[in-house]
């Protein structure tokens, strides 16, 4: 949807500002469509990350997310309660989630009371924010027009797809939880009765929850059958009306990541930082290729491979830090908001509705010179962030979930990534700690591999930073006159970027007076 309250900046009237002097804002500047895409992105990441220890927090979070999704669905224009067949799947799903919530309330048996899953909580909050945005501006949407109607249908499809992926992630976690129980029972010499439906690992007490979550998953899937791609094809993309958006998002990300790293940071936040750096590297490759196609960046056979290697290193480091994050670990809100805006700002330039745009299409989009300049500077800054992240591996008393660290230690030894112990096969984590789901100190192979991954990330980021520096514009801040003939940046790709804001900060986050920016 095109609804988009832009941020208001305090005490800015008619002055023109360099991008580096625009005050940062903590307001969420994403459109409803960008929020829904981010829910889909988070659900996909969740599906790749879950394990058996996440089953309880995921199950406790599920009903709240469904309630937020139903709230957004009900806020969309042109809805006719009780008449429109499109509403029946979400109504049915909400009823199923309500019974799950009722069964969980006051329950002493597994999963019992405990923490919720932070990623589902983040998706829930995003859905609530989108609903508030629609309620404020939904009346302005001309839903009787064909384009708006198709965009609304795409919004419903995105909502349901996010629920479908999340329900499947909960089911995967439940199956993994059952498999862990079977493995623990066999290791201790106890017999266990395998289930005869869904999978042999859907055993008590998780088996009943597998049945109930499978019903939720099937309800969501029924809405998406044979219509997912067609519905999303009608999704409206917000035009690139603010060429400096990506530069602002990356500047805010740099500030928030450094603020977070300056503190005693939880592993879950380090995972977010390393993954976002990996995303920046991946998106930078796309922008560099498009900039070369447009003739605003000189082609190079070194730049893209260097950025690609840095991206692989960041993602590998994120995977290792992910082993240290316990289920239910919280994310810092400012850091999470900054990462979400980075994802949205990149997608606005690099994507065409549901797919990645071709370099030829991206090359025609306004703001590409500014975006390329900003992303190369982010690659340059990645080297310094890598050094700070590596220091976190040397913090004493690092701990992590026993089961995840045990698996990682044995896998690294078998893969030859660490020094092979002289005594042969070693039990790195006592089985009792795994059964009790304790947080344990890092086994030596995990510590060694984590530091090696950090060193590799530092080296790859430093190489990419050096090459990006050669190809970046040489001289002048963004918004100022660049020096003609700078290395790797033809003169025709340089511009003075300015921003104008006509609204004062209204104060509360719920206020919606949109500010207007335009490039000159």
Image (tube, rainbow, N blue to C red):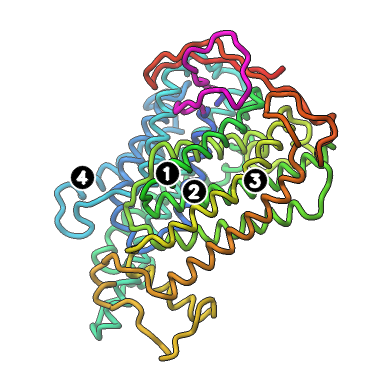
Contact (Cβ within 8 Å) of mark 3 with mark 1: no
Where residue 151 appears, as percent x and y from the top left, is 57, 28
Residue 410 included in the magenta stretch of the image:
no
User: Count of labels shown?
Assistant: 4
Q: Which one is in front in this view, the residue at disc 2 or the one at disc 1?
A: 1
Q: Earlier in the sequence, mark 3 or mark 1?
A: 1
Disc sitting over residue 177 in the figure: none
Residue 24 included in the magenta stretch of the image:
yes
Residue annotated with mark 4: 102
Q: Earlier in the sequence, mark 2 or mark 1?
A: 1
Q: Earlier in the sequence, mark 2 or mark 4?
A: 4
Quadrant of residue 247 within the rendered picture: top right
Contact (Cβ within 8 Å) of mark 3 with mark 4: no
Q: Is residue 227 left or right of residue 292?
A: left
Q: Is residue 151 left or right of residue 172?
A: right
Where residue 320 appears, as percent x and y from the top left, is 47, 63
Q: Residues within 10 Å of mark 2 (few under 14, many from 20)?
A: many
Q: Nearer the viewer, residue 31 or 99?
A: 31
Residue annotated with mark 3: 380
Q: Earlier in the sequence, mark 3 or mark 4?
A: 4
Q: Residue at x 29, y 65 (%)?
A: 439
Q: Earlier in the sequence, mark 1 or mark 4?
A: 4
Contact (Cβ within 8 Å) of mark 1 with mark 4: no
Q: Which residues are magenta?
A: 3-29
């Amino acid at each position: 949807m095109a609804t988009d309250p832009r941020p208001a900046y305090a005490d800015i009237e008619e002055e023109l500002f360099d991008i580096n002097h625009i005050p940062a804002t903590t307001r969420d500047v994403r459109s409803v469509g960008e929020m829904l895409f981010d829910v889909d992105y988070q659900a996909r990441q969740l599906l790749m990350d879950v394990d058996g220890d996440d089953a309880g927090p995921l199950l406790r979070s599920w009903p709240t997310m469904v309630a937020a999704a139903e709230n957004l669905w009900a806020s969309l224009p042109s809805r006719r309660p009780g008449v429109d067949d499109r509403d029946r799947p979400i109504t049915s799903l909400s009823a199923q989630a309500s019974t799950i919530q009722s069964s969980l309330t006051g329950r002493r048996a597994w999963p019992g009371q405990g923490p919720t899953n932070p990623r589902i909580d983040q998706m829930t909050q995003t859905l609530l924010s989108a609903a508030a945005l629609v309620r404020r501006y939904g009346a302005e949407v001309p839903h009787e027009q064909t384009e708006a109607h198709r965009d609304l249908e795409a919004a419903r499809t995105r909502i349901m797809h996010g629920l479908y992926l999340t329900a499947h992630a909960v089911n995967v976690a439940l199956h993994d939880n059952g498999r862990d129980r079977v493995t623990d029972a066999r290791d201790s010499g106890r017999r266990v009765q395998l289930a005869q439906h869904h999978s042999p690992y859907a055993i008590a007490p998780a088996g009943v929850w597998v049945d109930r979550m499978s019903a939720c998953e099937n309800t969501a899937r029924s809405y998406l059958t044979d219509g997912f791609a067609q519905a999303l094809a009608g999704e409206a993309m917000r035009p690139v009306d603010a060429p400096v958006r990506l530069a602002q998002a990356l500047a805010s990300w740099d500030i928030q990541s450094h603020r977070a790293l300056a503190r005693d940071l939880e592993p879950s936040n380090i995972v977010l930082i390393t993954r976002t750096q990996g995303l920046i590297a991946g998106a930078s490759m796309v922008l560099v290729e498009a900039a070369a196609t447009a003739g605003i960046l000189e082609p190079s056979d070194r730049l893209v491979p260097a950025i690609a290697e840095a991206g692989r290193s960041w993602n590998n480091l994120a995977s290792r830090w992910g082993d240290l994050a316990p289920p239910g670990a919280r994310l810092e809100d400012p850091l999470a908001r900054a990462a979400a805006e980075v994802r949205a700002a990149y997608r606005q330039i690099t994507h065409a509705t549901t797919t990645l745009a071709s370099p030829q299409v991206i090359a025609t989009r306004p703001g590409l010179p500014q975006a390329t300049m900003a992303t190369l500077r982010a690659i340059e800054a990645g080297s310094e962030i890598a050094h700070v992240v590596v220091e976190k591996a040397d913090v004493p008393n690092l701990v992590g979930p026993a089961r995840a660290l045990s698996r990682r230690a044995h896998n690294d030894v078998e893969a030859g990534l660490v020094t092979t112990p002289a005594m042969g096969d070693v039990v790195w984590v006592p089985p009792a700690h795994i059964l009790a789901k304790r947080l344990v100190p890092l086994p030596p192979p995990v510590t060694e591999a984590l530091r090696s991954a950090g060193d590799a990330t530092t080296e790859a980021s430093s190489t990419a930073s050096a090459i990006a520096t050669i190809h970046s514009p040489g001289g002048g801040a963004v918004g100022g006159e660049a020096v003609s003939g700078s290395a790797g940046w033809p003169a025709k790709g340089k511009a003075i970027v300015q921003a104008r804001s006509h609204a004062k900060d209204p104060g509360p986050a719920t206020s919606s007076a949109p500010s207007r920016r335009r490039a000159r």
